[in-house]
Amino acid sequence: MYECDVWIRRDGGTAVTVSIIPVTMANLEIVLPLIADYQTFYHATPDIERNRAHFGALVTTPALGAQWMATTHTGKAIGFVTAYRTLSSVSAAKRCLLNDLYVAPDQRGAGVGRQLILHCTNWALSEGYPGVYWETDHDNYTAQKLYDSLPTSREAVYIYTLQGLDLTKQG
């Protein structure tokens, strides 16, 4: 398991210890409310049982990926990041998808998101991935400001979704 980072951020002039820890079955319940907030942000309807099963499977099946949460010294979750292991046919190599990044609104701007991205990237590199990739909504300017402050490259792509159709009846 990748080691936890502990770092200090400034919050109103006071030093606050924030830890980035792996999500485990023992602490999954702590991050589930943030996951629900993240889903609401993206206009999805949270389902606590579905989330518990999905993210529990991620925790118990490391071949799928990994998840970490940022917590305060009191143990309160203030952000999380999720990485999924994928493959690329174009490069014929493995890829690491940073699929989820969320920081509680009252904690934004203090460096939590940046540290979660860096933590996830360090994990990916330690696992033999060349780095991480992710996507965001075209109008999520707050997140884009963070991403543009990192040594990233921005790509313009179209994402298509096809679901719930009976394709056997298509002509």
Image (spheres, rainbow, N blue to C red):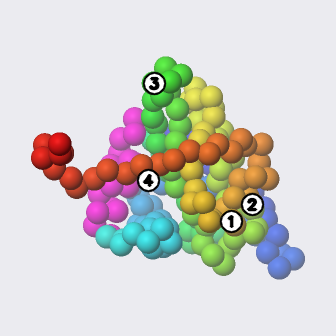
Which residue appears at 79% of the width and 65% of the height?
9
**Left or right: where does residue 94 sit relative to residue 115?**
left
The alpha-carbon separation of the residues under discs 4 and 1 comes to: 31 Å
The alpha-carbon separation of the residues under discs 2 and 1 comes to: 6 Å
Q: Is residue 124 above or below residue 4?
A: above
Q: Earlier in the sequence, mark 4 or mark 2?
A: 4
Q: Is residue 70 above or below residue 47?
A: above
- Which label belongs to residue 89? 3
Residue ID for mark 4? 24
At numbered mark 1, what does the secondary structure look like: helix, strand or loop?
helix
The nearer-to-camera label among 3 and 4 is 3
At numbered mark 2, what does the secondary structure look like: helix, strand or loop?
helix
The nearer-to-camera label among 4 and 1 is 1
Residue type, numbered disc 2: Lys
Residue ID for mark 2? 145
Query: Dots 3 and 4: beta carbons under 8 Å?
Result: no
Residue 74, image x, y percentages: 61, 73
Query: Dots 4 and 2: beta carbons under 8 Å?
Result: no
Query: Dots 2 and 3: beta carbons under 8 Å?
Result: no
Residue type, numbered disc 1: Tyr
Which residue appears at 52% of the width and 55% of the height?
100
Extreme residue toward the left, this view: 169
- Which range of residues does the magenta coloring cover? 48-64
Residue ID for mark 1? 141
Q: Earlier in the sequence, mark 1 or mark 3?
A: 3
Q: In this view of the protein, can residue 104 be seen by the observer?
A: yes
